[in-house]
Amino acid sequence: MVITRLNEIVEYARLSDGGSDTLAEREYILSKHREGLIKQISLLEDHLKALDYKINLYKSGKVC
């Protein structure tokens, strides 16, 4: 994933040199990155909910 993201950054930078002729391609890269971030945020929110549940078990004394 990190290598893919790095490749996207390099491609975006290369396209930026193309000026307005590459606007659509750059917008596409940014949109795909945004979609990935939304998925990551959702996953992190799920992990946070699970962690909060476990912490509340400890706080309630239900874990020995």
Image: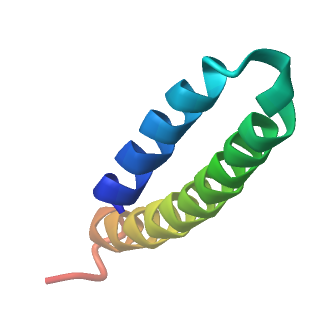
Instruction: Tell me the quadrant of the picture where the N terminus can be found.
Output: bottom left
Left or right: 55 as drawn, with respect to 10: left
Residue positioned 53% across, 29% down in the render: 14
Give how far across and how far down residue 9 sits, in percent: 47, 36
Left or right: 16 as drawn, with respect to 3: right
Is 47 in front, or is 36? 36
Is 18 in front, or is 41? 18
Question: In the rendered picture of this protein, how many numbered marks are placed on residues?
Answer: 0
Give how far across and how far down residue 6 sits, in percent: 36, 44
Q: Residue furthest left?
A: 64
Instruction: Tell me the quadrant of the picture where the C terminus can be found.
Output: bottom left
Residue positioned 30% across, 82% down in the render: 62
Is 27 in front, or is 54? 27
Indicate the colouring scheme.
Answer: rainbow
Residue positioned 54% across, 59% down in the render: 40
Left or right: 2 as drawn, with respect to 10: left
Q: Is residue 27 above or below residue 64?
A: above
